């Protein structure tokens, strides 16, 4: 079972691959969605959940989702067809950093996918290249709620992976972006996400005792739970920001 398969199973009960509740997703989309039949682009869309929720709320919008996970893209396409949204969303199995389109987008999303671009600011640069005039970016990124201690670092992080929230926002504004709205994931959202992640994977292993990967699934769930509860819980934060470009002087 590779990392992609583990992630796919782990997100069964929490299809938004970030510590965000359904209410938070709804609020963020209400704030972010453009009007007038604009187009949306999700860079690193995974299973396409953000686009499908956006399209269900605003049928006049059209969307493109991009991810290098061909199986996730295929599943997203099937889900969109089953929901009657297949004529409004196109999914593309390719590297999000290399995606090109003849369209310009009123909203570009990239939630928890900055690793695909080499970091936060490179992700914003890539997103900006796809924006229509006056368009917005909805981006989700981790930050340090507090300085990471040894247990957090031992869980697989480096101190310079992220900055604190204020520094993160300062870097964004210094790069020419204006925050219009932000949501900091609550401890409850984090706990729900992590319990869902580890629980979905553990349930799959219990339900498939004859599968050759069931032992690996158990181990992955246990290792993740250990890293979370004994490592980064309360230290790693997540912020989702709605941004527009600052006017050029």
Image: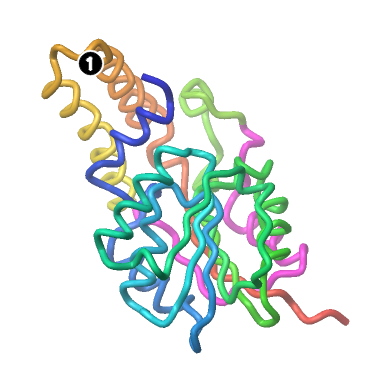
Quarter holding the C terminus? Answer: bottom right
Q: Quadrant of residue 50?
A: bottom left
Point 43% across, 26% down: residue: 3
- Magenta region, residue range: 159-186
Confirm whether residue 19 shows in the render. Answer: no
Instruction: Note whether 124 is above or below 224 in the view shown.
Output: below
Is residue 247 magenta-colored? no
Q: SS of the residue at dot 1? A: helix
Q: Residue furthest right?
A: 249
Point 53% across, 80% down: residue: 38
Q: Nearer the viewer, residue 69 or 160?
A: 69
Q: Quadrant of residue 2?
A: top left
Quarter holding the N terminus? Answer: top left
Local packing at callout 1 (Cα closer than 10 Å; few below 14, some 14-19, many 20+) is many
Q: Circle 1 sits on which residue?
A: 214
Taking the image as shown, residue 206 lies to the left or right of residue 53, namely: left
Where residue 229 sits: x, y (%)? 32, 30
Where residue 7 sits: x, y (%)? 37, 34
Taking the image as shown, residue 61 lies to the left or right of residue 191, namely: right
Where residue 144 sits: x, y (%)? 54, 45
Q: Quadrant of residue 89?
A: bottom left
Q: Nearer the viewer, residue 14 or 1?
A: 1
């Amino acid at each position: 079972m590779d990392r992609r398969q583990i992630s796919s199973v782990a997100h069964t009960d929490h299809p938004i691959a970030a510590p965000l509740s359904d209410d938070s997703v709804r609020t963020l989309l209400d704030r972010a969605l453009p009007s007038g039949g604009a187009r949306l682009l999700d860079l690193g869309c995974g299973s396409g959940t953000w686009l499908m929720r956006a399209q269900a709320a605003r049928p006049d919008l059209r969307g493109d989702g991009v991810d290098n996970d061909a199986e996730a893209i295929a599943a997203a396409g099937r889900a969109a067809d089953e929901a009657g949204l297949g004529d409004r969303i196109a999914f593309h199995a390719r590297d999000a950093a290399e995606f090109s389109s003849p369209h310009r987008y009123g909203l570009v999303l990239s939630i928890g996918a900055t690793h695909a671009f080499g970091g936060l600011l490179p992700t914003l640069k890539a997103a900006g290249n796809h924006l229509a005039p006056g368009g917005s970016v909805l981006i989700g990124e981790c930050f340090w709620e507090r300085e990471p201690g040894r247990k957090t670092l031992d869980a697989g992080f480096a101190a310079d992976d992220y900055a604190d929230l204020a520094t993160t926002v300062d870097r964004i504004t210094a790069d020419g972006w204006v925050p219009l709205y932000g949501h900091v994931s609550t401890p409850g959202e984090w706990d729900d996400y992590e319990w869902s992640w580890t629980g979905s994977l553990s349930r799959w292993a219990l339900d498939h005792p004859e599968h050759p990967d069931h032992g690996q699934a158990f181990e992955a769930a246990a290792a993740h739970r250990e890293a979370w509860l004994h490592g980064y819980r309360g230290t790693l934060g997540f912020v989702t920001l709605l941004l527009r470009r600052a006017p050029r002087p």
